[in-house]
Image (cartoon, grey):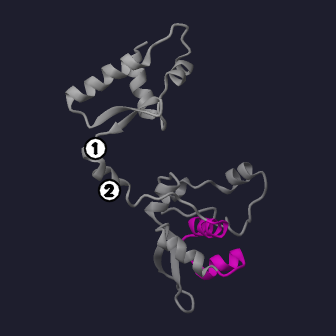
């Protein structure tokens, strides 16, 4: 076992500092393997090779961090990233739009049974849905569909990857609303 590579991988993968006790628990080795000398060796390699990473002692353990010179770039990368938190009404409307797209606000409201203007606005502000065109019915209503951000947020390649009605029934252990899944789902 190459403990140096193992420690490096654990430092990279761990969201919290790696302590000696945690390391011992992970390796479950009868012989005690000292973490500090391995950290020193890795740290020296990082420093002499000019890598953008450093290892710091934090909170009784060790953590791999980016070099301070690169913090501004990391901030820029995550600046527009935000955790996706949606209310139940927003999730319901988003589900309807995802499965029935392109769909008008009136159709979403008909399925949900309540007014959806603010929910649709929230979904548009979060860039999960967008206007895909206009309907051919009276008043030519806006038609909504999902976006690339929707796909990324839910880990989908395309809307064809959405679960089918049968899969949802099995997962949920009940019968989802058949009106919602009437078309099963469209592809982008």
Are there few (<14), some (14-19), or many (20+) residues within 10 Å of tag 1?
few
Total numbered labels: 2
- Which SS class for mark 1? helix
Q: Quadrant of residue 177?
A: bottom right
Relative to 185, residue 169 above or below? above
Examine the residues drawn in magenta and state their main secondary structure.
Answer: helix
Q: Residue at x 28, y 52 (%)?
A: 72
Residue 188 visible in image: yes
- In the rendered image, residue 113, in percent from the top left (x then y), is placed at 72, 78
Query: Quick check: marks 1 and 2 in contact, CB under 8 Å?
Result: no
The range drawn in magenta is 87-115
Residue 103 visible in image: no
Q: Nearer the viewer, residue 43 or 137?
A: 43
Query: Viewer-nearest of labels 1 and 2?
Result: 1
Q: Quadrant of the N terminus?
A: top left
- Residue behind mark 1: 68
Q: Quadrant of residue 118?
A: bottom right
Q: Nearer the viewer, residue 103 or 87?
A: 87
- In the rendered image, residue 100, in percent from the top left (x then y), is placed at 59, 69
Q: Which mark is residue 164?
A: none
Q: Residue furthest right?
A: 174
Q: Residue at x 46, y 29 (%)?
A: 61
Q: In the drawing, does residue 23 fall left or right of residue 115? A: left
Q: Residue at x 74, y 61 (%)?
A: 176
**Does the magenta run of residues contain 118?**
no
Q: Residue furthest top?
A: 31
**Does the magenta run of residues contain 90?**
yes
Q: Residue at x 24, y 45 (%)?
A: 69
Q: Which mark is residue 76?
A: 2
């Amino acid at each position: 076992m190459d403990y140096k590579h193992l420690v490096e991988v654990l430092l990279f993968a761990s969201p919290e500092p790696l302590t000696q006790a945690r390391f011992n628990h992970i390796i479950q080795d009868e012989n005690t393997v000292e973490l500090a000398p391995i950290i020193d060796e890795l740290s020296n390699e990082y420093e002499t090779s000019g890598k953008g990473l450093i290892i710091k002692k934090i909170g009784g353990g060790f953590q791999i961090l980016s070099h301070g010179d690169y913090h501004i770039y990391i901030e820029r990368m995550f600046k527009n990233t935000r955790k996706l938190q949606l209310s139940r009404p927003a999730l319901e409307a988003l589900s309807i739009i995802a499965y029935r797209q392109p769909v008008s606000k009136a159709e979403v409201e008909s399925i949900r049974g309540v007014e959806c203007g603010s929910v649709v606005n929230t979904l548009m502000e979060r860039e999960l849905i967008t206007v895909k065109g206009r309907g051919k019915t009276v008043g030519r209503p806006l038609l909504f569909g999902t976006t690339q951000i929707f796909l990324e947020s839910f880990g989908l390649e395309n809307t064809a990857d959405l679960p089918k009605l049968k899969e949802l029934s099995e997962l949920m252990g009940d019968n989802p609303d058949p009106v919602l899944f009437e078309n099963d789902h469209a592809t982008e």
